[in-house]
Image: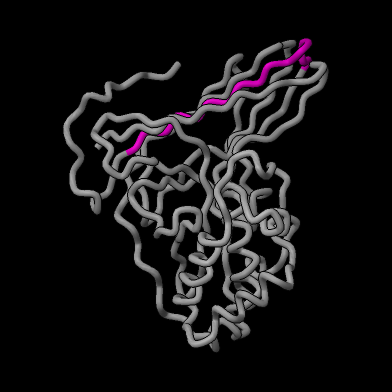
Amino acid sequence: MTETLSTAASPAPPPDRGWQLRVVHSTGYHYASPATQSYNEARLTPRSDRRQDVLATRIETTPATRAYRYTDYWGTEVTSFDLHAPHIEFTVVATSVVETVEAVPPVREATWKDLRSEPVLDEHDEFLRPTKYTPRDRELATVARRLRKGNDPTDTVLAVAGWVHEQLTYRPGSTGVHSTATDAWRAREGVCQDYAHVTLVMLRAIGIPARYVSGYLHTRPDAALGETVAGESHAWVDVWTGGWWAYDPTNAMLVGPRHVWVATGRDYADVAPLKGIFTGGAGSTLDVSVQLTRLA
């Protein structure tokens, strides 16, 4: 279903320029016995904004299904589909081509007094509250307050994200999809979801509005044109310091031309790439693959 591009391509242009990326995200369900019906929601469609321009996008399913699209409360494009026929396999393939820009610099417009003002607290209330994945944590809040001393809000964000990057060890399999920020902090390890959740706990504890972002990251900064890498969904944070800007604590870097964002919310629960229910099918297995190709 996916097209393969040759990796023997021309050299990459300078790394600070925007990229054109193709993302192919495939998810396959395999049921031990026929599922009689299923309903799913996919949050796999990138959106255009000042950081990226979506040139093409589509979602295909096998078997074919009826699909409906809507924009959820957080501004994410959702594709929902249902299948009312017995099936033992079900595959969802999302393909997008996106043009990105170089990293957007941090915003330095809000003071601590601004962040405590009633209009800001009211507008960003949902990105200041604890959630299931980002509960209050006394230890993390104490560290965040220490890192805030002598810094403005923007430099505090950078200090907090840098501290999380240094304290956690990236280790796939050490946490699960249901792990909270506290779980990851106690283990001192996790994956991008955990780095984002721990960062969110700390920023919200000191009054900086912050939200969870899901998307993708091409892992080769020096990728040649046409080069495809195997990847997976990635996560980082958006923060508000007078305007929204993005930072990737897993890699201790500003979000830039190799990042493609798809969905935002309070935490992972608001942006899960694919979730649904099915009847029948005595158990299921899941296969996921992501391929990112640099086109320009």
The picture quadrant where one finds residue 109 is bottom left
Main secondary structure found in the magenta portion: strand
Q: Position of residue 101 (x, y in %)?
A: 30, 52
Whole-percent x and y of residue 119? Answer: 59, 81
* Left or right: residue 68 compared with residue 18: right
Residue 63 picture location, percent across and down: 61, 14
Magenta span covers which residues?
A: 21-36
Q: Is residue 235 above or below residue 241?
A: above
Does residue 95 appear in the picture of this structure? Answer: no
The mark tally for this picture is 0
Residue 138 falls inside the magenta stretch:
no
Would you say 137 lies left or right of 235 here?
right
Residue at x 18%, y 43% (from the top left corner): 13
Residue 31 inside the magenta-drawn segment:
yes
Q: Nearer the viewer, residue 165 or 230?
A: 165
- Residue at the spot x=59%, y=40% of the render? 172
Q: Nearer the viewer, residue 189 or 32?
A: 189
Dividing the picture into quadrants, the one containing residue 20 is top left
